[in-house]
Amino acid sequence: MKERRELKIRIEDIDTDAFNLTLNTIFEDGNKQNLGDLLSIPDSRREWSWLVQTLNFRLGSDCSKEYLAKLLLEFASWTLEEQQSLGKIRSSLPWPILACIEMAPDSNALCLLADAALKGKLGDRGDWQLAEDRWKTLGVTAADFYYIPEDGLPFDRQIAQKNYPFILSGASVTHKDCNHITVQKLFEIWRSLGPSLAKKKVAYYVLFVLSISGEKGDIWEYLPITDMEKLVADRHQPHLYWTLLASLPDHFWEEAEAIKVLQALGESSLIVYGRPKKMSFITKLELLVAQNPEDGRLLRLLSIACLIGYQPSTLVNSNPDSFNDVIYQAAALIIKVAQADWLENDKIQLAEKLIALGKLTNQTIETTLEIIETHKMTGRSVELLLTKLYLLLPYTDWEIRRDILLAIQEQQGHRLGDVNVDLLTRK
């Protein structure tokens, strides 16, 4: 596949050095060759042939509403496994194709979008090219945000004049230039919009930019907690950038409604974490967890802090047996590992419970190894825990067993080093 060509699009009145929207352009300049010869490669998988056709679409040689409909119908005919086999290549598809695929929850919906494309409801090549020219010149304007495409489409035939495929979530943020002004302007756009996909997408952008502020140690004092609750509910993708918590002011943690916001964030399907410049918020989060020991959502947020070196106090009772959801069981075990106050029998039970996590076992054991390294945990208890894990894991999990064995060797190295220091001291 040709190298991804990304179009950066500013939002009206927002500093382009700080924040831009991005999408994969359809370009007609440069090399216009048709790659049809590649379609006849013997024994090539149909996914390969389809990808070559999408590249021809992108090069402009086969770029039309008819060809868009054809590509969507073919993709809809694949099995789920075949669709997923594209992996990261999928994110490089030209925006008209990708927007339709992202909008459709299943193959039937994709067939309906193919029919809409064939009827011209999504515009045609000239409309898409004019749209790109408009975005390059004017950026995304208020008219684009307020316009809602007909019939629930990802974009429609008005795309040349107004509209933007907000189903695509691409954005480019520059850390050093991203500041409270960026947050404020995105926040004002979000508040001005009625219920729409654009509003959900902007909510996601506000929270994302706030997470960058938190990572840099900047706190946004002016966000009412009622708006924070709505932003979290509105976000288009249920992902959390954990450093968002570091951007929240002290008064947020004192509000009664704070726990609702945190619970919603703790339910995120994916949590991406980093190390914020300021970590004083973690003690406030820990207090809430201690006051609500059976709330797995809060426990999950605190467990992330363990990965960056935080050791929860014994006030936090992280009992994995309190939860039915394996995600919250894993969070409880991660906290238990980081607390490092295990009794003799705890090491065996901890190892057995880690193994019992099923599909999350290997991931949580890797997290355990990471915590042991980050916290510089040593001693016989740690070595015994690792040995028990090594013995309990099946031989087929050779990669994780290898990692555990390396951790055991490192523990033994620490022990031998301590012995040598002791001998030298005695001399």
Image (cartoon, rainbow, N blue to C red):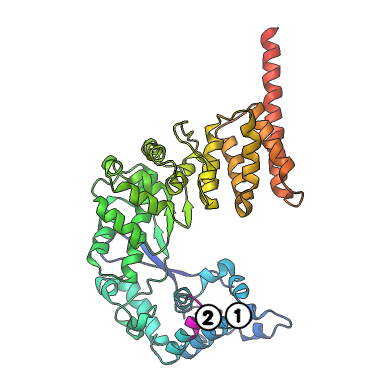
Residue 370, placed above or below residue 26:
above
Q: Nearer the viewer, residue 76 or 318?
A: 318
Q: Nearer the viewer, residue 396 or 324?
A: 324
Q: Residue furthest right?
A: 395
User: Does the rendering let one see residue 17?
Assistant: no
- Residue beneath disc 1: 78
Residue 56 % position (x, y): 55, 82
User: Does the rendering let one see residue 301?
Assistant: yes
Disc 2 residue type (three-letter): Ser
Q: Give the secondary structure at mark 1.
A: loop
Residue 103 is drawn in which quadrant?
bottom left
Q: Residue at x 44, y 49 (%)?
A: 297
Q: Give the secondary structure at mark 2.
A: helix
Mark 1 and mark 2 residues within 8 Å of each other at the beta carbon? yes
Which badge, 1 or 2, is on the more N-terminal residue? 1
Q: Is residue 106 within the magenta segment?
A: yes
Q: Nearer the viewer, residue 327 or 3?
A: 327
Disc 1 residue type (three-letter): Trp
- Residue beneath disc 2: 107
Q: Residue furthest bottom?
A: 119
State the CA–CA distance, disc 1 to disc 2. 8 Å
Describe residue 321's horizontal placement relative to residue 243 as left or right: right
Tell me which segment is drawn in magenta.
Answer: 105-111
Q: Residue at x 71, y 12 (%)?
A: 423
Residue 22 % position (x, y): 41, 67
Q: Is residue 375 within the magenta segment?
A: no
Residue 191 % position (x, y): 24, 62
